[in-house]
Image (spheres, rainbow, N blue to C red):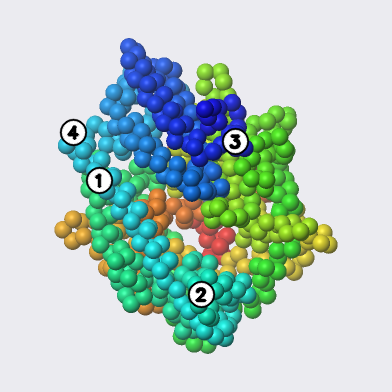
Amino acid sequence: MENPLLDLGWLPRFDTIDAAHVEPALRQVLEEGRVELKALLAQPAPTFALLVEPMEQMQHRLMRVWSPVSHLNAVANSEALRAAYNACLPLLTEYSTEIGQNEDLNRNYRTIAGDLSAELDATQRRVLDHALRDFRLAGVGLPEDRKIRYKAIMQELATLQARFEENVLDCMNAWSKTVDSVDALAGLPAHVVERARASAQARGADGWVLTLDQPTYIAVTTHADDEALRREFYEAWQTRAAPGPQHDPRWDNTQLIEAIVRLRHEAAQLIGFDNFAALSLATKMARSVEEVLAFLGELAEHCVPVARTEFAELAAFAGQPLNAWDIAYFSERLQQLRFRIADEELRPYFPLPKVLSGLFRVAERLYGIHMRERTDIPLWHPDARYFDVLDSGAQAIGGFYLDAYARPSKRNGAWMDECMGHKRIGGTVTAPVAYLVCNFSPPIGGRPSLLTHDEVLTLFHEFGHGLHHLLTTVPYPSLAGINGVPWDAVELPSQFMENYAWSPEVLSWISAHYETGDALPDDKLRRLRGTRTFLAGLQAVRQLEFALFDFRIHSEYDAARGTRAADIIAEVRARVSVVPHPEFNRFANSFTHIFSGGYAAGYYSYKWAEVLAADVFATFEESGIFASEVARRFLGSILSRGGSRDALEAFVEFRGRKPDIRPLLRQSGIAA
Ligand code: ZN
């Protein structure tokens, strides 16, 4: 059988890939990798060109085979594909552990980094530094018994972290609220009420059934006039996978939190770190536990007083003492009163084709690149599109797919992912290709897809990640584009791009009423821009609460006394929270970002990257947001450099100083 996944000609043959191709293709490419690795290690005198470059090629090939699979699993899911995908995950983990713990490979890399370092350039040395770091983090070099323990911890953690998330999901799926009078749903948007009616009918029940998914939770707490309903939802949400009357105790995550943090701590100590937070920082831009805590503390100092004032204003507006389940509801009302603007009202002004052409114009002005759509590229769905990215000489330097619309069997949310990484090794060049995926409402009849301004921000954000991937000049895949970029700096290019979607000039490029062609009227534009800083203090302290809890629970762990999760939450809240939290609130039990996802001892990254992005954008504002000299420096120092250099050095080279929190505070209206 000819397997299209193994055809590495140019772009993936999306029109012919089938679930049955997945596992055989992966097994083959992994097997080839093992054989090649063996041959590489049998060489008498390994050098960068003889060992490291082939390893970079191998990794690139593996990604090139696997990337279309994980992409299809996300945008064109089917039972067969999901089964094939899941069957492959353990194969990939096993392979990467084999590489990461390969003593021979580690020794050879070390020799090249030591004896031959004079022959290497800075990027090559950094490839080696990163690889040696990753060997260490995989547990290479440990005595055999510790290596076995380390591997066992990793496996147990993978299981426990997955169960943590399953408990949260099962708990949400099992919960529902039935109301028998539509009056109880007063204030909710019509589409939420319709969905509740449909849910009831699907269950063969009378009335309306509200489920505990995120859109419904947000809709109820933001819009439901009935305080009791808001409270009930708030309690159900904040006690997911926690003890309490709302959920089955078999999904209680309390003990899992203890076990996960204990195992992480043990793993960190096994490979020579004081605690898991220190291990997390080994791959980040922030240098030390103290630096992160000081950073969060400094933000808190500025944000807490502002949040207090906002909370007092909100309570005065509500004319009643505010409970935690009242915040979203009265915020929405106050915003309507102050800005008289609703998200939905702006949709007709942001048809996707207009937004795209304005977005492309921003990239043209900044970096001199052009996008040209192609219609001869195999796609996975008729709504997907492909664009070449051309440099100023009309040469294609890369490309991207855009899959913009929501549809069944497509994962929620929006993201950028790598289809092909940039590579320039041994005289051949592979141009980078990205996937940009969103979930906007599809066009209906002759009407184009219409976006809210929030969705416009999402598109700019993901396009920012895309430019990071596409404009890289780094030759080695492990450091090209977003690869090798520290987690706390990787959101810089994306958050930076969002700023442009707030600029009046850019708003005039991306808006045109889909019927009349009119640009966004001035008063709407003013009101929209006003919403940017609305209740920014309250939003910021919420993020700080999560970040401080996450970082402290991982840096202060002590085997004798356990996580002290409840105490740490109480201490953090006493310091940064202004909203009264009811005693029953157990947000940690459903904090999947840090207990099942990649944000463990890394939740601060959101704020960290926001500071970088605001500071970079402030540099542009000082000279004009399209100042070509500034854009050239940003491209040269940061955007094109991927993970090939230290993130702080790159920032300092661009800005002439270390990052400063003040531009972010100004941008969010927290400081004048
Ligand atoms: Zn992002």
Which residue is found at the position 59% from the left and 26% from the top?
9
Placement of 307 over or under 604, stated as above or below: below
- Of the residues under marks 2 and 4, which one precedes in the sequence? 4
* Near-viewer residue (468 or 220): 220
**Mark carried by residue 607:** none
* Near-viewer residue (656 or 276): 276
Mark 2 sits near ligand 1, with its Cβ under 8 Å away: no
Nearer the observer, disc 2 or disc 4? 2
Which residue is found at the position 57% from the left and 75% from the top?
197
Q: Which residue is mark 2?
A: 204
- Of the residues under marks 1 and 3, which one precedes in the sequence? 3
- Of the residues under marks 4 and 3, which one precedes in the sequence? 3
Could you say whether the residue bearing mark 1 is in a helix, strand or loop? helix
In the image as oriented, which residue stretches furthest toward the right?
Answer: 516
Alpha-carbon neighbours of circle 4 within 10 Å: few (<14), some, or many (≥20)?
Answer: few
- Of the residues under marks 1 and 4, which one precedes in the sequence? 4
Q: Which residue is mark 4?
A: 143
**In the rendered view, does 113 fall on the left or right side of 271?**
right
Quadrant of the rendered image containing residue 401:
top right
Placement of 381 over or under 320, stated as above or below: above
In contact (CB < 8 Å): disc 1 and disc 3: no
Q: Which residue is mark 1?
A: 153
Alpha-carbon neighbours of circle 2 within 10 Å: few (<14), some, or many (≥20)?
Answer: few
